[in-house]
Image: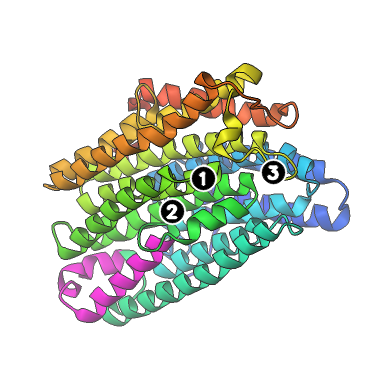
Amino acid sequence: MSINITDFVASAPLMTVTLTGVILILVEAARKSRVQVSFVLTLFGLLIASVLAIVNYSNEQTVFFGMVRQGWYANFLNLVFLAAALLTVLLSKPYLERAGVHRGEYYILILFATVGMMLMASANDLIVVFLGIELMSLCLYVLAGFLRTKEKSNESALKYFLLGAFATGFLLYGIALVYGAAGTTNLEIIEAQVPDLSSQWMFLVGVGLLLTAFAFKVAAVPFHMWAPDVYEGAPTTVTAFMSTGAKAAAFATLILVFHQVFRFTESNVNDLIAVIAAASMIVGNVLAIAQSNIKRMLAYSSIAHAGYMLSGIAAGNNEGQTGILFYLVAYTLMNVGAFGIAGLMENEEDKNLQLDDYTGLSQQKPFLAALMAIFMFSLAGIPPFAGFFGKYYVFLSAVKADMTWLAVVGVLTSLVSVYYYLRIVVLMYFKEGNGDVAAKPAFPALIAVTCSALLLLQFGIFPSVIVNAVQKIL
């Protein structure tokens, strides 16, 4: 066996992002002062990779000795990761310039974190899953501490690294046990053996350890406590990328491993996932009410949203997979937009991150207030925005899987979330204050948040655009 050109052509989006990262390393080594070149090259590389993902969308095949699977599923999620990276890069340039840390290595880390995410979505082997998770995580550890002179940023990176390394131990031990039971790490071969393996204790313990590792990556209860501190301390644009791209990558792998390979439908494993989903929805939404910091509030909100998406995993049916994939698109746009507005509000002293700082924002910056309102309405699941249909599809999958109780928990906790999301809208529009951004919002950042809002409205009015694309994966 040998690697041939077909492997690289089928993996063109992945190779493009990787090559762009390598070129940026050479550019930074040659001319460190040309950070604008790195910014432009990053945008160009991400756009080219997005075009190639669309061109290769239906090119279904396994490459690199059967360890990587390309096609509908991988390319759909590649577009989600690339969109998250592209929007983050547009938001980051003015944010980093304002913070005085606009350096080219930031874009290199974003690119290689995206490569890790793309590996996770296209993995056909548990070893590739591990490589993708570690590549993504190592880049995010550094990005979380990118503001090196700020204590909170250093604390954020250290906490994320220590707890992330702990979760990696669970992942590796789980892979080892699954390998011990199945005799292989190839997901296609394991899938064929699942009926026989499902009664072996070694395999089930390995599955439990894998679930623990993935629950940490998506910040699900009870492995969620790192998220508020890390989200608060990391640079706001990094938090946007971390809360969307990294979560989407973890759910991409969860679908691959637990929905498409293990297929534990109507088993104790799915019941356990349902309990984790319900706990995440309850804990995330209840604790979000008590937060006064916008980033911590959105962190607890992300825990709740992980619970909503885990409902689709617990259901274990095609509706669940459709719901999660649609939700990931909506969630990426909602959270990048919300953190993008928070980044525009933030100033050099980490001020304007309290909820009260949004008081009267509609009088000072009506356009930013309108965009923030759209993101809050969508996160709350209010039509006609995409967040509504994201919740609708995952709750529908739970009902069809005879987990009506889980859908009821989801609806009730969504009602709780309306309070803290709309609290920001009330502050912006119905209270008088001095809400304002530190400086005039930069054009690239405005483009990013505006596009996110428009796409949320587009996919909320015409959800079939995403649903039809997802149906081709099933």
Question: Mark 1 is on which residue type?
Answer: Phe
Question: Mark 2 is on which residue type?
Answer: Ala
**Residue at the image position 50 percent from the left and 54 percent from the top:** 228
Q: Which mark is residue 81?
A: 1
Question: CA separation, marks 3 and 1?
Answer: 14 Å
405 or 214: nearer the eye? 405
On the image, the x and y values in percent for residue 234 come to: 62, 53
Question: CA separation, marks 1 and 2?
Answer: 10 Å
Which residue position holds label 2?
121
Which residue position holds label 3?
42
Q: Residues within 10 Å of mark 1 (few under 14, many from 20)?
A: many
Q: Are marks 3 and 1 in contact (CB under 8 Å)?
A: no
Instruction: Answer with left or right where residue 212 lies relative to residue 434.
Output: left
Q: Are marks 1 and 2 in contact (CB under 8 Å)?
A: yes
| Magenta: main secondary structure | helix
* Residue span colored magenta: 188-216
